[in-house]
Image (cartoon, grey):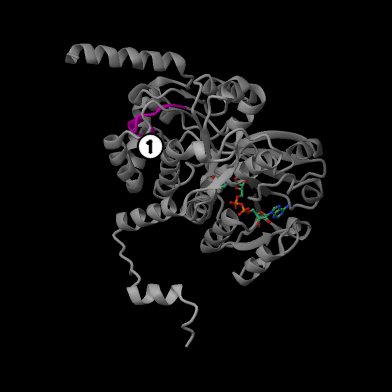
Amino acid sequence: MSAVKKEASISMSTAATQVRSDVKSLDLADQGKKRIEWANQSMKVLQNIRKDFIKSQPLKGVRISACLHVTSETANLAITLRDGGADVVLCASNPLSTQDEVAASLVRDYNIPVFAIKGEDNDSYYSHILAALDHKPHLTMDDGADLVTIALTKRQDVVSGIYAGTEETTTGVIRLRAMARDGVLKYPIIAVNDAGTKHMFDNRYGTGQSTLDGVIRCTNMLMAGAKFVVAGYGWCGKGLAFRAKGMGADVIVTEIDPLKAIEAVMDGHRVMSMGEAAKIGDVFVTVTGNKNVLNKEHFDVMKNGAVVANSGHFNVEIDIPALEKMASSRRPTREFVEEYSMKDGRKIYLLGEGRLINLAAAEGHPASVMDMSFANQALSVEYLVENHASLEHKVFPVPLELDKKVARLKLESMGVKIDRLSPEQEEYLASWSEGT
Ligand SMILES: NC(=O)c1ccc[n+]([C@@H]2O[C@H](COP(=O)([O-])OP(=O)(O)OC[C@H]3O[C@@H](n4cnc5c(N)ncnc54)[C@H](O)[C@@H]3O)[C@@H](O)[C@H]2O)c1
């Protein structure tokens, strides 16, 4: 193809991508491109996979619909999949997590259709998911399982063409396992969240740091000396608790699992029921994946000025309808801060509409940690393209060899070398007879 013809066909396909997409404004694309490039610098493992994908084209002709937080890190994943030969479209996995400038650049500069606008209402959110399913995907990528759920309930016409999928987060994996249990899951899914190189780092350090970042950006509160209540001491909760403690907060943990609770005690945090914590906390953050963890009983006893936020996947962890009912009035006071005036004169501040605060008010996880999560996504997609036919309609872990590959590549990118087992050690570990 001549250079002129090639250029013409690229700009025609870019025009088609622009027509298909729904983003806030393509005028934001310059800023988005810079953000995508900035994130890319810290995603060395993904860069490595991208180089291999460009050579081997393992995803040639594969249509992928991805429902993920539309951030600069996700953009680099989408570009990697595209460069591996896939035909990718992207929609948001949360109405408040989209970076509009990144969405614009993906459309204008990378020819990847995107359906996502920060702050979209629920109707637009779901119509964007439906638009992503119009792509008739072979593979779905989810963060929270909304795409699979909509496909299975409202777009059954596309389901027979889907041969596999991946899931990014704890809550999505829980939903998908329930679907598999009830026999409604129609294709195999890899639970990326369950890879060690995902939840041990992304959930703990990524959510931990960015959640605190979100709370601070909204409120500009001093963390030193603040009574900081963390509901849920799972991977996200322990990351958040340690980072808050590192800034000098007096951390209080609430839990329902005695194992997690004792872990929090021995990690040096105060542990108590939410009923008790509600009376003394300055800041409350839920990261449980559960509903109504903060409810009327707690709002009733909170101090004047208490700040409440959520970093779990769905905005159900705080009982916002109860808070609305209890308030005599409400008004926005700062960006992402809503002041609820209680009938007794107390004020309670809800951050980011109760949606995951690290993405609503900050930038989500740092790129260097998403590097591992999305390397798992890319390798899992490649694995599914090769192996989907032999997999049942269940939820599978990331194969251990891929998890270890991601860890090895990350260590290499950090210049960290580790030891190898000697033949003698390998033999010793494999044997039951050598005890002394
Ligand atoms: N904000 C983000 O960017 C981000 C990133 C990763 C995961 N997530 C989401 O965060 C949530 C937590 O993920 P995780 O990986 O930490 O899960 P996890 O299963 O490791 O931890 C959840 C913890 O919450 C506890 N819990 C449940 N109900 C509770 C209640 N009523 N009160 C107190 N504790 C309770 C559980 O016992 C468990 O220890 C999920 O919804 C997940 O999808 C968000």
Give percent across and percent down for residue 352. Answer: 60, 38
Question: Residue 277 at x, y = what percent?
Answer: 73, 59
Residue 417 located left or right of residue 187:
left
Q: Quadrant of residue 133?
A: top right
Q: Quadrant of residue 175?
A: top right
Count the marks: 1
Which residue shows up at 33% across the image and 32% down it? 83
287 in relation to 331, above or below: below
Q: Secondary structure at mark 1?
A: helix
Whole-percent x and y of residue 13? 34, 15
- Give the image quarter of residue 250: bottom right
Q: Does the magenta-highlighted stretch encompass residue 88?
A: yes
Asked whether residue 429 appears in the rendered view, the answer is yes
Q: Can the viewer see residue 361 in this picture?
A: no
Residue 26 located left or right of residue 143: left
Query: Image point 17% across, 13% down: which residue?
Result: 2
* Quadrant occupied by the N terminus: top left
Q: Is residue 405 left or right of residue 346?
A: left
Few, some or many residues within 10 Å of mark 1 (<14, 14–19, 20+): many
Q: Check residue 243 for magenta coloring.
A: no
- Of residues 36 and 431, the one drawn nearer to the viewer in this rendering: 431
- Please determine whether, in this image, residue 2 is positioned above or below residue 427: above
Is the CB of mark 1 within 8 Å of ligand 1?
no
Locate residue 18, reporting x and y percent.
Answer: 41, 16
The residue identified by callout 1 is 76
- Above or below residue 349? Residue 60 is above
**Residue type, mark 1 in image:** Asn
Residue shown at the point (73%, 50%) measured from the top left: 304
- Specify start and end residues of the magenta stretch as a single range: 80-89
Q: Nearer the viewer, residue 350 or 288?
A: 288
Residue at (69% x, 49% y) in the render: 305
